[in-house]
Amino acid sequence: MKFTEQIKGGHIMKRSLILACAIVFLSTLATGILWGQGKFSKETEEWLKKSELGPYETRGYDEKQLYEKAKLEKEVSVYSYSSRVHQFGKTFEQQYPGIRVKGFDMDSTEIVTKVLAEQKAGNFAADVIFLKDPSTVHHELLQKGLAFTYVPPDLKSVLPDRFQKPFLVHHVSLDVLIYNMEANKTAPVQSLWDLTKPEWKSRVSFPDPVKMPEFIEFLATVVQHGDEMAKEYQRVFGKPIQLSKGVKNAGYEWILRVLKNDAVIAGSTNDVSNAVGQPGQQKPPVGITAFSRLRDKEKNPKLVFDVAYDAKPVLGIATEVVIAIVNQAKHPNAAKLMTRWMMGDEKGGQGYKPYFVLGDVPVRTDQLAPKGSRTLAKMNVWMADPAYVWDYGQEIRDFWLANLK
């Protein structure tokens, strides 16, 4: 097992472990603050009424009226898993003069940890959270009254129910297998199991799942589809899979063998795409990264990677990116206005524009996919199951850590 320079001395690994432990500890404390006999605290209840959120949400959507209320609040604070918060924040300020956007770019795990700590301290600094890892958002924030779903009323008719409940889904993100297309006319790997073969020893780049929880979702989904992974193994190797001692199914076995094949653990999806896509390599690696990294090729045309679209049993895993308004947010009207801005229009404009790119799949039924994109229906992917990730994610994370070299 190798780590890229972004994980020198195990600093990021240790930091991520601390964050994960903090989530468990802080969520227990915060729960006692907000809940009593299964009800919201008095303060939260009053805030919900005043903000017209939760059970007090109004039906109609009047942008002008909402803007006037938001102007009185003067600002909105957004905790975002994506650095693109600064792009949609800037256009929001242009569209709605008088409201300042305070955007904070951090990992999804950090967002949850920070919100839990702030809620415990009574420091209600965040208004909107925008992040991955929906299973944690649901169990640690929504179910405990630490965050609330707001679906702009004018969008309810163009959003499938599954993208409105239990939280508002902004877009579907894909994590996929990529290869260097300068060194290979076609994808040199045809199956996820190819990543375990000797010829790919030390040549598979995988993002650190402890730092980036969406890759726990990736691993959990592979484990959940253990039967399909077993069938794919037999197709590739021509014989039934033999599980290692103590390994539960073929999904776990795949994780184990990828790690034993000396995979290179990267600090970010950007590190993976850069490692795979650098030109001039005689034996370039392959890797798992965010599909949306394809946009990097527009900024750096020298990058020469592409998606292994025909990989079996799937080319990747689809996960949801969600938006919520934080309990007792100081700027609830500005938070509503920001949420609506982020969801964009039917052409992929407004605040959605930074995400109207290859690899990010829109959830609005009236919104066409970006030019050159393939729809989810036309791609062979597995959809991550938040309930399964919540039930087994920690076990899978522990399995990963236990088998790191």
Image (tube, rainbow, N blue to C red):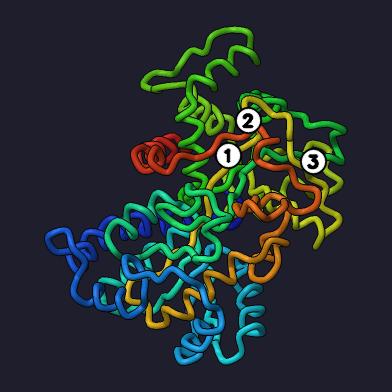
Residue 257 horizontal side relative to residue 378, left or right: left
Q: Is residue 191 above or below residue 239?
A: below
Counting other residues with Cα less than 10 Å from the Cα at mark 3, is it few (<14), some (14-19), or many (20 or more)?
many
Front tag of 3 and 2: 2
Mark 3 vs mark 1: which is more N-terminal? 3
Labels 1 & 2 near each other (Cβ < 8 A)? yes
Determine which residue is flagged by label 3: 180
Q: Which mark is residue 314?
A: 2
- Residue under the image location 31 percent in, 74 percent down: 48
Determine which residue is flagged by label 1: 317
- Residue under the image location 72 percent in, 56 percent down: 357
Check disc 1 and report its element: helix, strand or loop. strand
- Rendering coords of residue 98 (x, y %): 57, 92
Task: Tell me the distance, in whole angstroms, between the alpha carbons under discs 3 and 2.
Answer: 19 Å
- Three-letter code for the amino acid on which mark 2 is drawn: Val
Front tag of 3 and 1: 1
Quadrant housing the N terminus? top right
Visible in this render: residue 8?
no
- Residue under the image location 58 percent in, 57 percent down: 6
- Rendering coords of residue 139 (x, y %): 32, 52
Counting other residues with Cα less than 10 Å from the Cα at mark 2, is it few (<14), some (14-19), or many (20 or more)?
many
